[in-house]
Structures are given as C-alpha cells and as structure tokens.
Image (cartoon, helix red, strand yellow):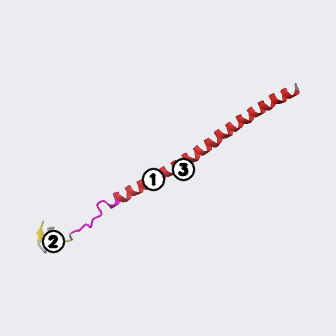
Amino acid sequence: MKLKEDIYSLKQELGDIKQESFAMEMLKYSKRQNKILFVIILILLVFWFATGSYLIWVLNDIGAEEITTESYEIQQDAEGNNNYINGSDNSVNNG
C-alpha cells in the first residue's frame, strides 16, 4: 500500500509541477509579448515624430522663395501733397 500511495503522491506532485511550468510558460510568453509590443510602440512613436518633423520642415519651406520689394521715397511738400518717387525708373507720382 505504501508504494501505491507514494506513486499517487508523486503523480500529484508531477501534476503540480506541470501546472507550475505551464504558468511559468504563460508568464514567459506574456513577458515576450510585452517586450514586442513595447518595441512596436517605440517604433511607431519614432515614425510619428519623424513624420511630424518632416511636415513642419516642408511647411516652413513652402513660400520661402526670394521676395523682391520696391523701395519708394516719399516727400511731402508744405501743402500736404505727397510725392512718391519710384526707385526703378525715378518717375514721380503725385498724390
């Protein structure tokens, strides 16, 4: 009888060990999955920031062509009339 009881208790212990190893296996699997998800989230964040930075760079670059301006000299006489002298052909516009 002692042998049967020992075998029965060993089978129960073996079953407990298998259950613990299954639990440990699930914990290891969960840990591995969490690491993978963390890496994926980091990669997505890097791509998101890179896309945002590129968008800001592109939007700042639009319309950055060289802008030319014309200069005018404004002279006002004693009567309050303004004379605009165009800088390119020196024509006088009375106003």
Q: Picture coordinates of residue 4 (x, y %)?
A: 84, 26
Q: Which residue is mark 2?
A: 86
The image shows residue 1, relative to residue 36, as above or below, that is above
Q: Which residue is mark 1?
A: 47
Q: Separation of disc 3 and disc 1 at Cα?
A: 12 Å
Name the secondary structure under disc 1: helix
Crowd class of label 2 (few under 14; some 14 to 19; many from 20; radius 10 Å) = some
Disc 2 or 3, which lies upstream in sequence?
3
Instruction: Name, please, the residue furthest toward the right.
Output: 2
Over which residues does the magenta segment extend? 59-69
Q: Which residue is mark 3?
A: 39
Labelled pair 2, 1 in contact (Cβ < 8 Å): no
Q: Quarter of the image holding residue 27?
A: top right
Residue at 33% x, 61% y: name it: 61
Name the secondary structure under disc 3: helix
Q: Nearer the viewer, residue 86 or 25?
A: 25
Image quadrant occupied by the C terminus: bottom left
Q: Quarter of the image holding residue 85?
A: bottom left
Q: Amino acid at mark 1?
A: Phe
